[in-house]
Amino acid sequence: MSEYKWRYGLFLGCVIPNRYPMIERSIRDVFEELDAELLDLPGASCCPAPGVFRAFHIPTWLVIAARNISIAEELGVNPITGCNGCYGTLRDAWFDLEHNPEEKKHIQTILAKVGRTYKGNLEPKHIVQALYLDMGLNYLRDRIKYKFNDLKVGVHYGCHIVKPSDKRPWDGEYENPTFLDEIVELTGAKSIPYKDKFMCCGAGGAVRTAVKEVAADFTREKLTNMRDVGVDIIINCCPFCHLQLDLGQVEVNNFYKDIIGEPFKIPVIYITQLLGLAMGMDPNRLGLMKNHELTGVSPFTSIEPFLNLVKEQL
Amino acid sequence: MSDNVEKYIKRKVYKSTSSDIAQKFVDAGLEQMRACINCGTCTGSCPSGRRTAYRTRVAIRKALTGDVSVLQDIDIWLCSTCYYCYERCPRNIPVTDMIIKLRNIAVEEGYILDSHFGLANNIFYATGHGVPCNAENQKQWRDLRESYGLPALPPTVHSYPEAVKECQTLMNEVGFKDLMDNAAKLKEERKAAAEKAEAEKKAKEEEKS
């Protein structure tokens, strides 16, 4: 039997392992440090992405999502993801199947053909949900070693961690949630309110794949609103938002250079990277140090300004 | 749904379209949109509509009146599925989910962007990932993983080729491959028809001059 306090099945998805492995590094090591075991889900696939594949064919979305959940069920653990998109898919598919016995039976029959069983007894969770609801702020607070009292943070929630609210664990709150700000502020950093804070980053719903300029225009608006209140960094909890705010920042600087004034250069940091640093963890374990000479890889917006800010305080 | 309601929907809502499409709207449960009072909360809440021509209320209205152009325009693909319309609708219409269903019908009718088709058919179906890192020209992403002390390939379908086959079996079972093949065929036919019309127009103009 495992000696850990919590156990989950880490559902990686696509963008975390294949584009932002520093996020994977930080999730794995922070959870280890918090006494939570993360089991791999061997052979898991794309969740499938709710904005594209669900929009193309709902039955495909449902059956592949159920397969991914069934891998965690086989290990007897709740699937957990660090991605709002994966969270949207796994949680909505799970919720929909729990409320539609006929469809659930149908999906079970199809999965049986490849030797899989789907029960639906293990609720899919988000990393932030585990931090906030399973572990709780007091548990996290006891593990904080450093406080970044001068750090001004623009918190970006993304959409699918809170919406659709009837399928989420936040008591129906979607207009003004605070759970992520509360975790951020445990580190001493200040979450700065900004205009349209809960607006979408623009990447989701197949928009980025359809017209990159439209996605970047959402991002331009967000970045402008954040810069107006003087944030030092952006903290988020979704790799697709992370990509859109990081790589998208470069695109905004390119597409909209005539209207934004100075180019944007706001470091984009994932929640477990900041939390781990405040817990006194080695930045190498949080994917914050560059140990390679590769070009054309993430992060596309330098995080040096962030490292400089926290270096003085550490 | 009672027979009367169904009759009403078919008579009032879908009379202007081809019956096939009308039936698809009904089958997809889009009659839920009948509750719409045209208040525009969806459009007013839409971050996409602030910068594009996409108007949520218009898309709903078009679907209700059976206007096939809602499937043909790019507009419904500019919804970022942020779910504000879903949350705020005073009539409790799951608006975002309705847009997703409209997209499903659009794909069935072969109205899918090239970039989306490529993503679905050549990447997702082929690799099991929507964003893979195992192609020959994606070595930098595998190296990046290793630089953070992670294995070059994650323990996903990338490390289990038989899992890719399993996903494909499931996708075939629910008709994904057929759907994609059909969409490709319809796209090709439309392209050919458009080219033919263009050529005929040109020939006529040349004849005139």
Image (cartoon, coloured by chain):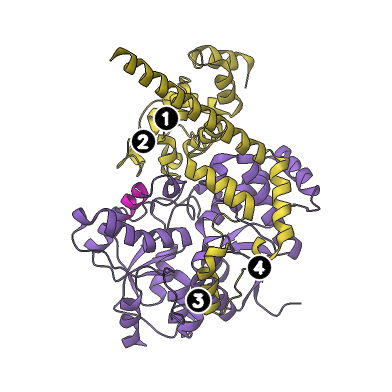
Chain colours: A purple, B yellow
Disc 4 element: loop
Q: How many marks on residues?
A: 4
Discs 3/4, front: 4
> Residue at label 1?
B59
Closer to the camera in the image, A187 or B146: B146
Q: Nearer the viewer, mark 3 or mark 1?
A: 1
Quarter of the figure with the C terminus of chain B: top left
What residue is rendered at 42% in x and 46% in y?
A: A207
The amino acid beneath tag 1 is Ala
Question: Which numbered circle lies on residue B16?
Answer: none
The residue shown at (65%, 76%) is A5
> Over which residues does the magenta segment extend?
A213-219
Q: Chain of mark 1?
A: B
* Label 1 neighbour load within 10 Å: few <14, some 14-19, many 20+: many
Q: The residue under label 4 is which amino acid type?
A: Pro
Say whether residue A209 is left or right of residue A112: left
User: Which residue is identified by label 2?
Assistant: B54
Is A263 left, or right, of B146 in this rendering? left
Few, some or many residues within 10 Å of mark 2 (<14, 14–19, 20+):
many
Estimate the x, y position of residue A310 in percent, counting from the top left. Answer: 34, 82
Q: Position of residue B175 (x, y in %)?
A: 68, 38
Distance in Å between CA atoms under marks 2 and 1: 8 Å
Residue on which the image places disc 4: B155
Check whether the beta carbons of the residues at disc 2 and disc 1 lie within 8 A of each other: yes
Answer yes or no: are tags 3 and 4 on the same subunit.
no
